Amino acid sequence: MLAALGLSEVYAEEAINMRSEVRPFQRCVRTIMDTTDPDIWFDEYGVSSHVIGFEANLAAEVRAAQAGERLGELDELVARIKQAGEGKPYDCVIGISGGVDSSYLALQAVKLGLRPLAVHFDSGWNSELAVDNIHNLVTKLGLDLYTHVVDWREMKDLQLSFFKASVANADTPTDHAFGWVAYSQAKKYGIKYILSGANFASESILPTAWGYNAGDAKHVAAIQKQFGSVKLKTYPLMGLVKRNLWYPEVRRIRTAALLNYMPYVYKDAKRAIAEELGWRDYGGKHYESVFTRYFQGYYLPHKFGFDKRLAHYSSLILSDQMTRDEALALMETANYPEELRRQDHEFIAKKLGVGVDELEAIYARPPVPYSAYPNAEESAGRLFAMTAALGAILRKLRILR
C-alpha cells in the first residue's frame, strides 16, 4: 500500500515505526502531558520538558500578565495601534473563528477603544452554532465583517489530499488560508496591525510532533500535487517569504497578541462572551468547525494517539487555572459523544464526495511523517534568521531617518 502512495522505502519504514514503536508510558508529575508526545522527556523528578521549557521561557511573562502587571505595556501597544490607524476606516484586523480566544479578543479590543475589521475564512466546515456566534459578535460589537469564501471544489479536494497523505496535520488547508485572509485585508486598507488570539495562558503547550507548520505552502502544494485531482487556482497559498518577511518586515504589518498583556482566565472569558455577546459553547476547544471537532476529537486520537486536550489542560495547569486532578478527571469524560462522531463521520464523507467505507479505508492507512513530502522546513530556519537580521536593519534605518 505504501509503495502505491509513492513513498520511498525509508519513509515507508518510518511510517510503520510511527505506529508500532512502543515507549514505556510516563506522565508528567506537574501537568498531564505524557509520552503520547514522542519528543517529551523527563527530569529525575518526573517533571516534563514542557514544564521545564515553560518555566525557563514563558512563566515570568504569563504570571506578570495574569497579575495585571503588563497592563501598562498593553496601553502603550494600544496607543501605537490607534496612532497607526489614524485617518483609516480601521486600525487593526482580527481573525474571527467563533471560538473563545478570538471572540474574547474582539470584545476586549472594542473595550480598549480599537476599531477592528473582523475577517473570517469560510472553509465550508462552519457549524451552524459558529455562524450564529460570529453573527452575534459582529452585531453586538458593531463590527464590519469580511468573509472570504473558498472555492469548495478546490477546498474539498485539498482536504481529501491531506487525508490520503496520512499526515497528522490534516487541518492545514483551513489554518494555512486564515493568515492570507488577514494579511490581504490589512494590505487593502493600509492597516499595520493584526490582532491574534494566540495566548500563553491557555496555549503554552503544543507538541511539535503532533503536527507541522501550516504556513508551509511548499508542503501544501506538494501534497495536493501527489494526491489531488484539482488544480489550486484560487485557494490562497501564501509562501513563507511573503508570510514571514514581506508582510511583517517590508510592509510593516505587525501581529499583536493582546491576550498576553492582560489577565486571561479561560473560564472567565467564556462567561464574559456568553453574557455580553450571546456566545454559546461548542463543548470543546476549537469545536466551532465541524471538521476541527472531528479532526481533534477522532482523527488525531484514533489514528495517531494524539489528544490535544492534554496540551490544553496542561497549559491551564501551568497558568494556575486548573489543578492536575481536575484535568485528569476531565480526561475521563467524553467530550465527543459517539453518536455525534458517527454523524460527523458520515457528514464529512458526504461533503468530501466519498463513501463512508472509502473514508475509513483512507484512515486505515499507516501514519506518515510530514517529512515524507516536500517541505520548506530547512529553508524556513534560514529565512527566520534572515528575517530577524533584515528586521533589525530596517528598524535601525527608520530610527536614523
Image (spheres, rainbow, N blue to C red):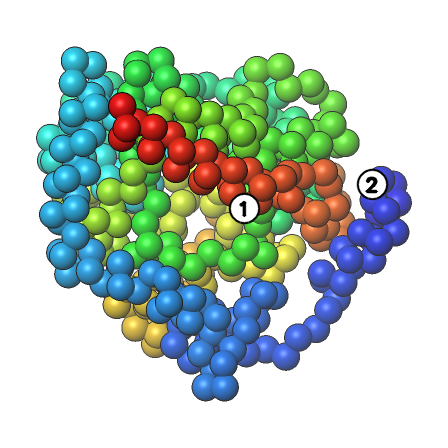
Looking at the image, which residue is at 13% across and 56% down? 68
In the picture shown, does residue 269 fall above or below 217? below
Can the viewer see residue 187?
yes
Looking at the image, which residue is at 19% across and 38% down? 77
In the picture shown, does residue 70 fall above or below 355? below
The 10 Å Cα crowd at callout 1, few under 14, some 14 to 19, many 20 or more, is some
Percent position of residue 313, x then y: 37, 63
Query: Where does label 1 land, which residue?
Result: 295
| Amino acid beneath label 2 | Leu
> What whole-number distance in Å separates the C-alpha atoms at marks 2 and 1?
22 Å
| Amino acid beneath label 1 | Phe
Percent position of residue 378, x then y: 64, 44
The residue lying furthest to the front in this view is 400
Looking at the image, which residue is at 37% across and 67% down? 56
Percent position of residue 344, x then y: 53, 41
Where residue 282 is drawn, which disc sits there?
Answer: none
The 10 Å Cα crowd at callout 2, few under 14, some 14 to 19, many 20 or more, is some
Query: Where does label 2 land, which residue?
Result: 5
Q: Secondary structure at mark 1?
A: helix
Q: Earlier in the sequence, mark 2 or mark 1?
A: 2
- The quarter of the rendered structure image containing the C terminus is top left
Percent position of residue 181, x then y: 42, 23
Give the foreground label among 2 and 1. Answer: 2
Marks 2 and 1 close (CB-CB < 8 Å): no
Q: Secondary structure at mark 2?
A: helix
Can the viewer see residue 160?
no
In the picture shown, does residue 353 fall above or below 307? above
In front: 181, or 359?
181
Looking at the image, which residue is at 49% across and 81% down? 43
